[in-house]
Amino acid sequence: MADKVRSLAWADGSLHLIDQTKLPAVFEVIECRRWDEVADAIRTMKVRGAPAIGAAAAFGVVLGAMEHRGDAPLEFTAAMETVIRELAGTRPTAVNLFWALERMEKAFKAQEDKPVAEIVEALRLEAEAIAEEDVKACWAIGSNGAALISKGSGVLTICNAGALATVDYGTALGVIRAAFAQGTEFHVYAAETRPFLQGARLTAWELVQEGIPAALITDNMAGWLMQQGKVQLVVVGADRIAANGDTANKIGTYTFAVLAHHHGIPFYVAAPLSTIDLNLASGREIPIEERAAEEVTHMLGQRIAPEGIGVYNPAFDVTPAELITGIITEAGIIEPPYGENLAKAFQKD
Ligand code: MRU
């Protein structure tokens, strides 16, 4: 990361975020002083990536409490409920958002009868804890997964599961960072990730910052690369992992998993335990976000498709558990049978 700046940080009573819609052309940090600015930043993907939106929303709750600190107790509670509900409505797929908001709600309920200043402080501490735990989890994911990358291998990833998508360091990119730091020589293929181009704009930017040898490819090149023997490992992030291991991640991930299976290439998901949703039995229950048609009909503000064409723009897909070799978490690498082993990971927690 540039000057080791985090994707988000709390400073001087506001949430500072790298505006990810402007990268790589412009590195700009925006300051959210109100909770609805945080909600807007999540909705418009100024901040994105499952763990990052969870942490951002947690700080959004702190801002909500600060804005309503003058309210009478009943109004204050009602305002907090609205803030949490509205933040939960910003994006539907990444479970980290709901996980973080639940933690904030619990922290609020535990302090409800205290003076408002104490509530605000307790919420700030909880949001800081969520952010710090995410950084620790990412480093542990990196160290648990690094050995999967062997000397001379080609590693394919999609979207951005890097420092920008988390509070720092990254999940799939955390594994890549850790292997690189250990001195392993390998080559990354970053898929551009149409339509929002998180791979081309964000992952490529992070890889260049770190000096990790990498090539940017378009999404439809993956199969050919595999057939040519250029890919020995696929590692991706996750937005929500169901109890049976089915994994929602950026659209295009499923295609890579099918291709990897066909070519006998290991396919790993890297994610913190906060991305695992044991309440959902399978991936069929994961809500898949659909985004605006303009993301497909336009590129960088320029129309590339004719007026009048219909558009379908699902932002995520679900990779069935049977295509996943292992799930790299802060608690170790979880292997099949996922139904049993994911539940066990939480018992240890
Ligand atoms: O739509 P986005 O950019 O928020 O989607 C992000 C992804 O799909 C990431 O792979 C996932 O959130 C994991 S981030 C560590």
Image (cartoon, rainbow, N blue to C red):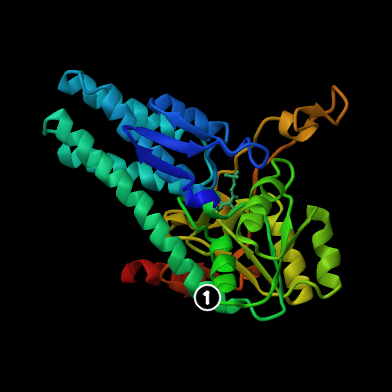
Q: Which percent across, then down, holds residue 117?
A: 16, 31
Q: Is residue 283 above or below residue 324?
A: above
Q: What residue appears at the point 11 percent right and 33 percent down from the top-left corner? A: 113
Q: Tag 1's secondary structure?
A: loop
Q: Amino acid at mark 1?
A: Glu
Residue 239 visible here? no
Q: Which percent across, then down, holds residue 25?
A: 68, 38
Q: What residue appears at the point 75 percent right and 32 percent down from the top-left corner? A: 300
Toward which corner of the image does residue 26 lie, by quadrant? top right
Q: What residue appears at the point 49 percent right and 45 percent down from the top-left corner? A: 7
Q: Which percent across, then down, holds residue 218?
A: 80, 53
Q: Which residue is mark 1?
A: 335
Toward which corner of the image does residue 93 lie, by quadrant? top right
Q: Is residue 262 left or right of residue 228?
A: left
Label 1 crowd (10 A; few <14 / some 14-19 / many >=20): some
Taking depth in this image into account, of 246 and 53 the one nearest to the observer is: 53
